[in-house]
Amino acid sequence: MKQLIITSIACLLMSATSYAQYDSKGDSISSRFRPGAMWFFTGWRPARIEKARKYDRLVFDITYNDWIGDKDLFEVHWASIGLNTNLLFDIPLTKGNTVSIGTGLSHSFHVTRHNGRIEVSDSLGTTTWSPKAPTDEFRKSVLGGHSFSIPLELRFHKESWRHFKFHVGGKIGLQTSMYQKYVMGHWLERQVMKSYKFPDQNFLVYSAHVRFGFRNWALFGSYNFNTLFSNPNSIQLNRVQMGLSISLF
């Protein structure tokens, strides 16, 4: 019986030791550089012992897209979904990488579905919005587009791999394309009208964003400081994004 008790205690101690390797201060180096879903990837070469752990280098933001300004929040359709893909360098500022800088390249695809009509006037150089009239034939109207940006964010998180994190930063970039789409009819009679023409489209985009969460997961929020359209006589809309961030590497 005594031997069984000693063996059980030894097994428990071995289990505790193996579990401790996942802490940032564990003795084993085998898990020190394996964050996120790619926990078993260290690159082309084994990670150096003195190298700081890095996190959140490939981040996807799944977003609900909305506007604020001449339109109030939460007036658009719930299916206004977008995706931000962020490829980032994690630059540690402290030995345990509890504070770091993230920068790299970001692509944003955004779709805002609304119940209205966007009207473009080439002669006036304006882009306006009007509510759907009973005589309008379209079933769905969408404003979407793509943009590329350079993000810069300051990151705070605990030293353990099971860390709480808080990111605050901003982006500056270009709205490379923007389109409006009207869908009419149903199923086999479905017709789609698409246009890329906006006389006063703002090509420069700059925004602030924040993430806070746990390990691979975080809540995400973003606000664009500049409006979608530059003409003061156009509808004044600032893009707002809210959603969930998933860090894979």
Image (tube, grey):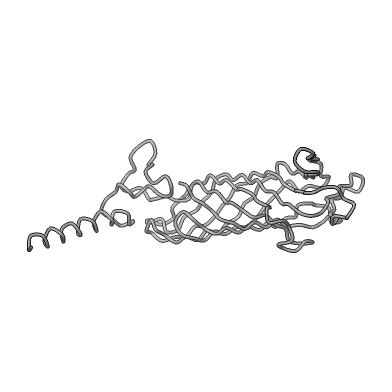
**Residue 175: x percent and y percent?**
70, 45
Asked if residue 11 lies left or right of residue 23, the reply is: left
Residue 152 location in percent, x, y? 56, 52
Q: Where is the N terminus found, in terms of image quarters?
A: bottom left
Residue visible at 83% across and 53% down in the picture: 231
Residue placed most toward the observer, 81 or 31: 81
Q: Residue furthest top?
A: 44
Q: Is residue 56 above or below residue 69?
A: above
Image coords of residue 100 (percent x, y): 46, 55
- 26 vs 60, left or right, is left
**Residue 142 x, y percent position in the rendering:** 75, 48
- Report which quarter residue 76 is drawn in: bottom right
Q: Which residue is nearer to you in this view: 116 or 55? A: 116
Residue 205 falls left or right of residue 60: right
Apparent side of residue 225 relative to residue 32 in the rendered image (left or right): right
View extreme (right): residue:
123
- Total labels: the figure holds 0
The answer to whether 29 is drawn above or below residue 193 in the figure is below
Residue at 55 percent of width and 48 percent of height: 60
Nearest the eye: 236 or 100: 236
Task: Kindly identify the residue that appears in the image at 50 percent across and 53 percent down.
Answer: 101
